[in-house]
Image: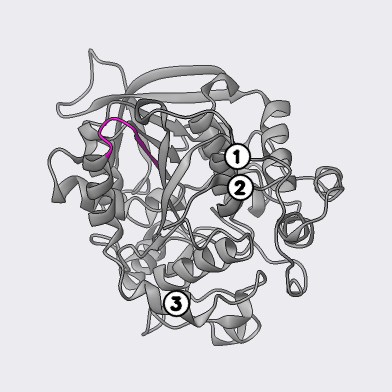
Amino acid sequence: MKFTQYAAPLLAAASVVSAFPAAKRNVTASEKKYIILDNDWSSAGFIPFLIALDAGYEVLGLASDTANTWQHQVALHGLATLEMGNLSSCIPVVPGSTYPLLNTPNKFQAWEAVHGDLAWQGAFAPYNATAEALGSDPTSGDDPNRVVKGAFLEGFPSEALIQGLGDSQSAAAFMVEMVHRYPGQVSIYSGGALTNVALAVRMDEKFASLAKNLVVMGGYIDVNLLQVTGSVNQNDINSDINLMIDPEAAKIAFTADFPDIIFAGNVANQVISTQEFLDEVYEVKNPYSELMYNDYGTIFPFWDETAAAILVDPTIITNATTFYVDVDIAYGSPSYGNIHAYQSALMPPGLRNVTYVNSIDSAKLKTMIKRSVQYPRNCSTMGMTL
């Protein structure tokens, strides 16, 4: 998910109070819905896990990956946005891989020198000390573990939570453990790079088949004309940074034997944030709605939120198709990190069928976002603790 900061940091947040009490009936093990959300978390990137909680999913953990910024900064954003909603005691943050499988900032920038710059370069944008001093999340540089505290509009996480990151297992190992614990019940949500998912696939040959599904925000297709006939921002929202940060990982993930792989690619651009909608959400005031109101902005679509909504409620889908998909991992190609679709009669060997969502019910997506942000669940209302 790409995110630009627009406003001053949020003041100290009060506790989130939910209007939705925990369900009273007993839920059997076979009925429980589990999810791991792997994302490049940011100050206003919390809505996907609120959507999952609102839909009754047990969030097993938030995994962090390098995409918009470096993994460590991402993990701290995950901690901070959980803490502001009283969710730290029941949802862990598990740190993912700091580096992609093969890609590096230098390699990425060398590719740009040949094929042109991306409007959004994420963590691999050239190091900019001035921007970081002004509160931008870190990019490139010699130390991927450095922290820019000024970027935490949600407030910086407590020291106890930060220390807990050092005791955590890796995101890939955590994913493998969870699908073995709850076979066929764990959905894997990927809103950033797919490095952790690919590592889990390679770590355990049963991992993908034991998961319930993989839902991906990314995988734009046939958007080159849109990239050149509009503004730089239009090019930005049609670039596939989640895949391009780690193309090799995307190829591994998309050829793994998940029972189902679902893409929220082009459709993720369908619903764009507006001031009118932000005003509507902020009619119910809490720390999450205030942060969204002040800092989500009105330039970008609801990318990650669209993927989360598709995962928790497939009835939001109004049109979808299936085809076989591959990822271009030829470093010399201008399409490096982009997907290519095939029909079964003409595809190369080793590919698998995926579901590609073409359109969704826009009003339903907004309703899901609004409800989850206005009335967020917390650990006490869900009766959950680590």
Q: Which residue is mark 3?
A: 162
Q: Which residue is mark 2?
A: 381
Q: Quadrant of residue 101?
A: bottom left
Q: Is residue 332 visible?
A: no
User: Percent position (x, y) of residue 46?
Assistant: 59, 54
Residue 184 colored in magenta in the image: yes
Q: Residue at x 64, y 74 (%)?
A: 155
First along the sequence among labels 3 and 1 = 1
User: Percent position (x, y) of residue 308?
Assistant: 53, 38
Q: Which residue is mark 1?
A: 22
Residue 127 colored in magenta in the image: no
First along the sequence among labels 2 and 1 = 1
Quarter of the image with the C terminus in it: bottom left
User: Percent position (x, y) of residue 255?
Assistant: 23, 35
In this view of the protein, which residue sits in the foreground, 121 or 373?
373
Looking at the picture, which amino acid does disc 1 mark? Answer: Ala
Looking at the picture, which amino acid does disc 3 mark? Answer: Ile
Is 205 on the left-hand or right-hand side of 75? left
